[in-house]
Image: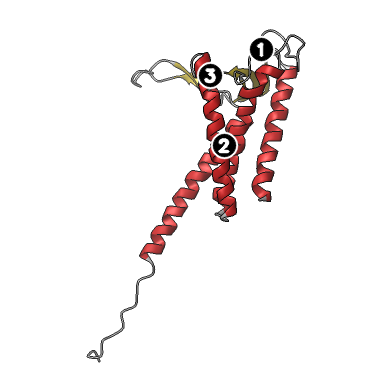
Amino acid sequence: MKRPLIIILAILAFDQALKFWIKTHMYLGQEFKIADWFIIHFTENNGMAFGMEFAGENGKLFLSLFRIIAVSGIGYYLYTLVKSKAKTLLITSMSLIFAGALGNIIDSTFYGVIFSGSEFQIAQLFPADGGYASFLHGKVVDMFYFPVVEGYMPDWIPFWGGQYFIFFRPVFNVADSAITIGVILLIIFQSFGQTSKEQEIVGEPEEIEPSATEE
């Protein structure tokens, strides 16, 4: 139980510490370059990971409630994996996914209540006039931006030919990264697990003993 707990607490601590620093030191849209391909860019989103949106106030409430239900299910599944002493890679992947989902839930659940808005100003923690949104209607803080490659699509590409593109365009956070890494590890586990099962079914070829009539 120690390993998944350490993973979860470490990711949550790093994720929330960075988000608190961003909220209390930068205004919305502010950025600074660490390198040409690595920018800290403060943005917030109302929806899902990597800045994807889920429309409207009711949509936001539904998404927050769905996240809470989903992360509860993931947490219970992780608990059963630990109790049954499942493979380390599977437990690690689910720990990463759980920590990432929980990190973003904290934003959408509490940030609207405890922070003032960040538009054209540095947000205040526990403002006297109240937060920028109600309970479960907060925004998720994102900051990692990696415009590694940018330019124009070749004209011969259907639909997107001649359009300007940036890779990687979405801005994300530590929690999003944990979820992504967790899913990748889960896919790797499933791939290796399936291979192992197939090997167990096939097994080693049996040696055929010569019959008594064969000299």
Where does label 3 land, which residue?
Answer: 60
Between residue 93 and residue 152, name the one nearer to us. Answer: 93
Q: What element carries label 2?
A: helix
Q: Do the residues labelled 1 and 2 touch (CB within 8 Å)?
A: no
Camera-side residue of 119 and 9: 9
For label 1, the SS is loop
185 w.r.t. 164: above or below: below
The CA distance from mark 3 to mark 2 is 18 Å
Q: Residue at label 1? A: 132
The amino acid marked with disc number 1 is Tyr
* Residue drawn at point x = 42 percent, y = 53 percent: 194
Name the outermost residue toward the left. Answer: 213
Can you tell which quarter of the image residue 102 is in? top right
Alpha carbon separation for disc pair 1 and 2? 27 Å
Residue found at x 44% / y 58% = 196
Q: Residue 27 carries which label?
A: none
Q: Which of marks 3 and 2 is in front?
A: 2
Q: Name the residue under label 2.
A: 72
- Horizontal and vertical percent position of residue 21: 74, 23
Query: Which element is circle 3 on?
Result: helix
Question: From the viewer's perspective, is residue 52 above or below residue 29?
Answer: below
Q: Which amino acid does label 3 sit on?
A: Lys
State how far apart marks 3 and 1 are (Cα).
Answer: 15 Å
Task: Give the vertical position of 84 relative to 161 (above or below).
Answer: below
Mark 3 vs 2, N-terminal side: 3
The C terminus - image quarter = bottom left
